Image: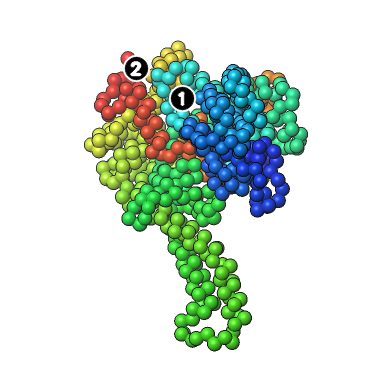
Amino acid sequence: MAALSLRQKQLDLIVRMLHLNQPPPPGTAAEQEEEVYKILVLDTFCLSLLSPLLRVADLRKHGVTLYFPIDKPRQQVADAPAVYFLRPTQANADRVAADATASLYASFHLNFSSALPRPLLDRLAAATAASGSAHRVARLADQYLDFVSLEDNLFSLAHPRSYVALNDPKAADADIEALVDAIALGLFCVAATLGTVPVIRCPRGGPAEMVAAALDARLRDHLLAKPNLFTEASASVASFQRPVLCLLDRNFDLSVGIQHDWSYRPLVHDVLGLKLNKLKMPADKSGPAKTYDLDDSDAFWVANSWSPFPRVAEEIESQLAKYKQDVDEVNQRTGGSKDGIEFDGTDLIGNTKHLMNAVNSLPELTERKKMIDKHTNIATALLGHIKERSLDEYCDCENDMLTKGTVDRSALLGLLRGKGTKEDKLRLAVTYLLSFESPVASELEQVEAVLREAEVDMSAFQYVKRVKSLNTQFSASSNTATRSNIVDWAEKLYGQSISAVTAGVKNLLSTGRQLALTRTVEALMEGKPNPEVDSYLLFDPRSPRSGSGGQFKGPFREAIVFMIGGGNCIEYRSLMELAECSQPSKHVIYGATEIVNGVEFIEQLSELGQKAGLGGGVNNPPLLQ
């Protein structure tokens, strides 16, 4: 399974880049203290790419003494080499040329997160040649690292508002194509970093097929070159079975993108705004603003991030009690006797040994206390939001609708009239709308009326309602011409990617808690005939022909699952559980155009509703005239 260790492979390539594209010296970190000190220059995206992988102390271990944003003024450091890590844009190429012209650094080691296009390469070369600074450029490398590794099995392409961009009714074809190409490029970088060419599966139509075709073409073109990025890797993993890349569109299942969740990690992401594995806590009565790292260096986070919140609170109390017990034990062993007996010197050797043990245990105790304090502060902040907004009741109500197909009308209306932010109420109402194929008309009217009373912007609700109605008409229509007219009209009003938003919910309801995405991925990995995925397209960049045909359909032990339009913690957890519970075990990596929480996604739905003229909650005209 080591072949798909995406985060580690990306980190190894970045460390090599920091060592001027040479393998780092062997030995421990202490033995690797560099004699050559370097400057690191980054753009905003590459800084966010490095943030989950390396901290300032790690940079220093690899000889980086200072790092700077490329778009800020910088002073000359004439005797130091500079490592540049940038996206290949014209603005960045021009800034590099200006820095070289100004002789800011002794030498320039230029690294681009993906391939630098030939026109930009020529532009950079001409500018440095004209200024007589070309000799300062020691190396230029395409790194193919244009993605953010958040965890071993989680990555993002960091394309903000991707769902809006792909579904905007006013989006120009050129803008859609540019985003599709950017997504395909990011996935190409993932494949290149892993060193394997995946088999691609996707549903027909919409962004998933567009991205699949673009990625397939990019991989095919690259494989024509000998050698290529996959030549060495394929030789070193000759027995490694290729993974399947499952491409899906967010419209496959909208509900999981907006629902509330009761587990620790989704709560921290949704309520407190976890970004790039960092949590910024605002200043309050208990102290100044703090920033916490929540990643695999935090043992408590690793062990408890998927636990229900009440269990996390119990675990924090348990850890605190154990910490106090260990501190009391150290105090007693080092002479802090409660009986008041004075030390007479007869047990000098014993007490010295205890004292040495106590000194040795201090760093570990200090770290434990910091960890306990951190999670106590986070849990306290979460608890405040939970009580203020009745988040536990929202979770229960949504869970009943999504997994049982039932709703307590009084509980639903009570929440919409009661505590919670406007976004909470809107998310609950949209979840209600998506949970039932045909909601009771009188019940639906009540929900809408209560939302208006609460002065909730109805744009997202009306948008989802319209798309659902559209899909119902599409599914019910047996007349091909009528279907074609509906689709044409829909694409003009709702953008490029109309698909059955209720299809995923039906799958979700039929199997209890297992998500539609997880069932689909499991079916694609098994490679057996299955009516739910038999119609999926297959692209194999290594085969002579591709598209709807192809022989290599599985089974697969490894999968890369990519959600176009935004992923979330809930789907990630479900896929990790699938991998752990499978026999034999499977390996799944989950990625998305961006990782969004429920508030961020409902805002994107609202924006689309407003763009389609569905805002404000007023009565809308009939669907079709």
Amino acid type, mark 2: Leu
- Residue reaching furthest to the left: 453
From the viewer's perspective, is residue 203 above or below residue 238? Answer: above
Q: Quadrant of residue 311?
A: bottom left
Q: How many marks?
A: 2
Label 2 crowd bin: few (<14), some (14–19), many (20+), radius 10 Å: few
Q: Secondary structure at mark 2?
A: loop
In the depicted view, which residue is nearer to us: 554 or 334? 334
In the rendered structure, the answer to whether residue 604 lies left or right of residue 147 reads: left
Q: How is the image coloured?
A: rainbow
Residue type, mark 1 in image: Leu
Q: Residue at left 59%, top 77%?
A: 352
Q: Residue 183, percent across and down? A: 54, 27
Q: Which residue is mark 1?
A: 166
Q: Is residue 332 left or right of residue 119?
A: left
Q: CA distance from mark 1 to mark 2?
A: 23 Å
**Helix, strand or loop under label 1:** helix
Instruction: Name the residue nearer the viewer: 601 or 396.
Output: 601
Q: Quadrant of the N terminus?
A: top right
Report the disc number at residue 624. Answer: 2
Residue 572 image position (x, y, % from top left): 52, 41
Q: Is residue 137 left or right of residue 418?
A: right
The disc placed on residue 437 is none
Q: Earlier in the sequence, mark 1 or mark 2?
A: 1
Residue closest to the eye, 180 or 545: 180
Picture coordinates of residue 541, whole percent (x, y): 67, 24
Residue 587 seen in this snapshot: no
Q: Quadrant of the C terminus?
A: top left
Compared to residue 203, the image places residue 518 above or below, namely below
Local packing at callout 1 (Cα closer than 10 Å; few below 14, some 14-19, many 20+) is many
- Residue lying at 44% horizontally and 30% vertically, measured from the top left: 161
